[in-house]
Image (tube, rainbow, N blue to C red):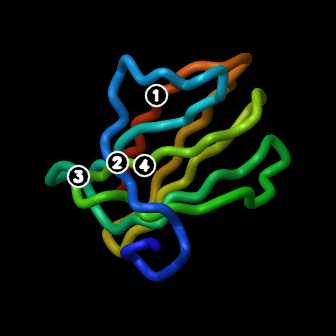
Amino acid sequence: MAADGCGAPAQSATPADLDTNGQVVLAGKVTGTDGPIGGAFVRLLDSGGDFTGEVVSSPEGDFRFYAAPGSWTVRALHRSGNGEATVTAAGPGLHQLAIAVA
């Protein structure tokens, strides 16, 4: 059960040597002017801009999605600001993102 009450799984840091078992993993950290931002709503949008999923960043700002190969936008929404990053995941593996909110 998720600790945040929205049904999203609890988030934690993703190790760089993570065995993705052949999956596309989009992972990273949400940061602001004072460092990592926990409690941000992190949304996964497909190449057409359609909502695909959402998690809440960990207290250390970490988030992770399992996705299909393709182009993705990851958007972070927080009371201190918003930010986004895009990634093209051509194949399986760990694809790291950094999202700065302002």
Asked if labels 2 and 3 touch by Cβ distance under 8 angstroms, the answer is yes
Instruction: For marks 4 and 2, give the CA distance.
Output: 4 Å
Q: Position of residue 79 (x, y in %)?
A: 36, 75
| Label drawn at residue 69 | none
Give the amino acid type for the residue marked by disc 1 in the picture.
Gln
Task: Say which residue label 3 marks.
Answer: 60
* Mark 2 secondary-structure assignment: strand
For disc 3, the neighbor class at 10 Å (few under 14, some 14 to 19, many from 20) is some
Asked if labels 4 and 3 touch by Cβ distance under 8 angstroms, the answer is no
Give the amino acid type for the residue marked by disc 4 in the picture.
Phe
Give the amino acid type for the residue marked by disc 3 in the picture.
Glu
Task: Please say if 17 is above or below 2.
Answer: above
Q: Residue furthest bottom?
A: 5
| Label drawn at residue 63 | 4
Task: Say which residue label 1 marks.
Answer: 96
Q: Position of residue 8 (x, y in %)?
A: 52, 67
Instruction: For marks 3 and 2, give the CA distance.
Output: 6 Å
* Mark 4 secondary-structure assignment: strand
Q: Residue furthest left?
A: 34
At 55% from the left and 53% from the top, the residue drawn is 75
Instruction: For marks 1 and 3, give the CA distance.
Output: 15 Å
Instruction: For marks 2 and 1, give the CA distance.
Output: 11 Å
Q: Nearer the viewer, residue 59 or 36?
A: 59
* Mark 1 secondary-structure assignment: strand
Q: Position of residue 12 (x, y in %)?
A: 33, 48
Asked if labels 2 and 4 touch by Cβ distance under 8 angstroms, the answer is yes
Q: Earlier in the sequence, mark 1 or mark 3?
A: 3
Task: Say which residue label 2 marks.
Answer: 62
| Res 72 quadrant in image | top right
